[in-house]
Image (cartoon, rainbow, N blue to C red):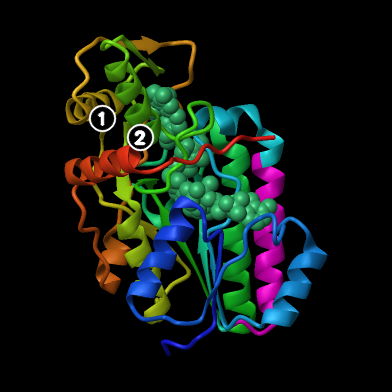
Amino acid sequence: MDKNTKIYVAGHRGMVGSAIWRNLKAKGYTNLIGKTSKELDLRNQAEVELFFRTEKPEVVIDAAARVGGILANNDYPYHFLMENLQIQNNLIDAAHQNKVQKFIFLGSSCIYPKHAPQPLKEEYLLTDTLEPTNEWYAIAKIAGVKACEAIRKQYGKDFVSLMPTNLYGPNDNFDLKTSHVLPAMIRKFHEAKENTNSNVKLWGSGTPMREFLHVDDLAEAVSFALENKLEDHLYNVGTGEDLTIKKLAETIQEIVGHKGEIKWDSSKPDGTPRKLMDVSKMNEQGWKAKIELKGGIEKTYQWFLDNEYREVIVK
Ligand SMILES: NC(=O)C1=CN([C@@H]2O[C@H](COP(=O)(O)OP(=O)(O)OC[C@H]3O[C@@H](n4cnc5c(N)ncnc54)[C@H](OP(=O)(O)O)[C@@H]3O)[C@@H](O)[C@H]2O)C=CC1
Ligand SMILES: C[C@H]1O[C@H](OP(=O)(O)OP(=O)(O)OC[C@H]2O[C@@H](n3cnc4c(=O)[nH]c(N)nc43)[C@H](O)[C@@H]2O)[C@@H](O)[C@@H](O)C1=O
């Protein structure tokens, strides 16, 4: 890919978008465009069409979405379904109408059925019912995957979907109501340590298993997809390794240096029991995760200590 290609990174201030931006800048891409949601509300079709006609991006990376952890997904089903459909439909269709050559759509591992065999292969999509806590978000993401697949099939364009597993890293959302588990644990253990090592309350039973990928590894997968023509339309992106939420809690507790007790709040949902990705398809294309979990969490905790963190509020 020419380093002067005009690349629009939608959602460039979010955890994923900012990691992609850093990665592409470091690789020498000079013509990146980013707009905040205040400057360009991607739910608004007219605004998006005008932006594409004026800016004429050649490549689009879609890292803009309504994103949140298990509780936000469960509590705001309409936001997670409708805003994601609006954002991705506007971006995909404007890209198609304005002759964008390449479009990278980001979904999530929650698109796969709740009780699919493990590890999750791309071909398990739409073979059974979804996990109820995030089916709204998952249905929007499945529609995005299908829209890109349809454009590929009907028009032969290079529109591709990457499905990341649970992500973490710098610039994550650390709001305790809307965040994912890993940033929530960093903040909870840190604040409890500062507060005479008080007990930490975590959600659910601690038995579900999750896979975690550092966002810089995902950014490398995105830039790999940018620079190479992937053979198919859908690829899982993860480490291929998972652990229980309880083990994750113990790991973060040790990294933070918290000495109190962990209490499990069974009134909060567990969500899907397991969603381990089969990443062999993406590995065969030539991308592989590099950052191991403990080191990645240590770096993220250091980032949390050194920076003013974001809190995403749903309204
Ligand atoms: N975090 C995770 O664990 C995972 C994330 N993903 C996927 O990665 C992508 C990015 O997620 P992540 O970076 O974590 O999310 P963040 O919440 O950190 O960032 C989302 C970005 O989307 C932008 N955005 C949201 N709504 C609008 C809107 N109406 N108009 C314009 N921009 C908007 C925000 O812009 P602004 O800041 O300007 O308001 C923000 O920069 C999503 O597609 C998500 O599904 C997939 C798997 C796991
Ligand atoms: C990326 C993915 O993220 C979401 O799915 P999820 O993996 O279930 O989300 P999560 O990270 O919030 O929780 C993982 C597990 O961890 C437990 N848990 C313990 N204590 C806390 C806690 O304090 N906060 C949170 N958030 N979870 C906690 C929690 O009960 C659950 O068992 C999707 O909605 C969907 O949007 C999606 O794609």
Answer whether residue 90 is magenta in the image.
yes
Q: Which mark is residue 23?
A: none
Q: Which mark is residue 248?
A: 1
Q: CB under 8 Å between callouts 1 and 2?
A: yes
| Residue 215 falls left or right of residue 91 | left
- Given the image, on which type of amino acid does mark 1 rest? Leu
Q: Which residue is mark 2?
A: 182
Q: Give the residue displayed 35% in from the left and 66% down from the top.
A: 221
Q: Ligand 2 within 8 A of label 2's CB? A: yes
Closer to the camera, 248 or 196? Answer: 196
| Residue 252 falls left or right of residue 267 | left
Judge whether 168 appears above or below 10 on screen. Answer: above
Judge whether 41 appears above or below 166 on screen. Answer: below
Answer whether residue 265 is magenta in the image.
no
- Image coordinates of residue 265 in percent, x first then y, are 42, 11
* SS label for mark 1: helix
- Image coordinates of residue 172 in percent, x first then y, are 43, 44
- Image coordinates of residue 156 in percent, x first then y, are 57, 83
- Given the image, on which type of amino acid does mark 2 rest? Leu
Instruction: Give the crowd class for mark 1: few <14, some 14-19, many >=20 residues within 10 Å.
Output: many
- Image coordinates of residue 101 in percent, x first then y, are 56, 84
| Residue 61 falls left or right of residue 209 | right
Mark 1 and mark 2 lie on one chain; the one further toward the N terminus is: 2
